[in-house]
Amino acid sequence: MTTALANNIQIEYETFGDPSNAPLLLIMGLGGQLIAWDEDFCRQLADSGHFVIIFDNRDVGLSTKFDEAGVPDIMDMVVRMMQGQTIDVPYTINDIAEDAVGLLDALGIEKAHICGISMGGMIAQTLAIHHPQRVRSLISIYSSTGNPLLPQSRPEVLQLLLAEQPVEREAYVERNLVIFDAISGSGCSYDRDYVRKVVERSYDRAFYPQGDIRQFAAIMTQENRKTLLGSVTVPTLVVHGTDDPLVPVEGGKDTAEAIPGAELLIIKGMGHDLPHGECWERIGRAIASHTRKAE
């Protein structure tokens, strides 16, 4: 893995495949380190003709941490937002999108296929809106437009997500397994041992729950992109599962509806799963088919 200076911060990244192939930037979701991208999935994409780039978003993994920004009080933010007050946050989804653009700059990549999952989909959409000249195609996976009128996360899942992270390793692992148990769908195979290994590696590589909270604050204050997405003209693939309790499937439908000509792939029984298993093999094939058509 390598570090690049991007948007005035350090971004840790890794690549797969031939640099002469079409670049494909994969953007991870809330609190997810680059190791949450399954290596077999990345190699599948590389073998299908992509130069795959994965990275740690700001405030997670080995990229720059924003300690000086402090830790937002999420419950206080909720109350103030309900009262219509303006909320100041350490950074925004737009700022994280600028990091991704900065990474492309650092790698000397003029245009790339941009794929994001969950919060990463929000970042990818934002990049496509504000930097259309850098995007070959867009892939948004179990994400949303930021439209406040859409169905929200199930309360019990949100409560799990916002509970304080244990500091002790085994307690941390068990708590996060409970979260993944709750958000994984019934229609895709759920490999709990695989998930455990990802969570253990994440803890050992960079335990930093403060960053997760600041990223969540950025999600809470994201702009409503529903109208802005109408300006996106690049080929777009939207993927969502019917059983997603964290970002309901209406978020994917809203995204596809907002972007002219977008293709919508709904996967029956898929939840908010990690990139692993047969459902993700199907998504990998769909991405490869999509980018070939875009090229």
Image (cartoon, helix red, strand yellow):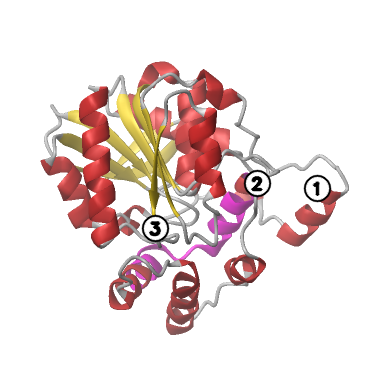
Instruction: Classify 36 as above or below 159.
Output: above
Quadrant location of the C terminus in the rendered image: top left
Q: Dot 2: few (<14), some (14–19), or many (≥20) neighbours within 10 Å? A: some
Q: Secondary structure at mark 2?
A: loop
For label 2, the residue is: 150
Displayed quadrant of residue 234: top left
Q: Which label's residue is closer to the chain start, 3 or 2?
A: 2
> Compared to 146, does 127 lie above or below?
above
Specify whether residue 27 is painted magenta: no
Q: Decide which of 101, 82 is in the foreground and name it.
A: 82
The residue identified by callout 1 is: 81
Q: CA distance from mark 3 to mark 1?
A: 34 Å
For this orientation, the residue located farthest to the front is 268
Tell me what residue is drawn at x 25 percent, y 63 percent: 277
Is residue 96 something that shows in the picture?
no
* Badge 3: residue crowd in 10 Å (few <14, some 14–19, many ≥20): some
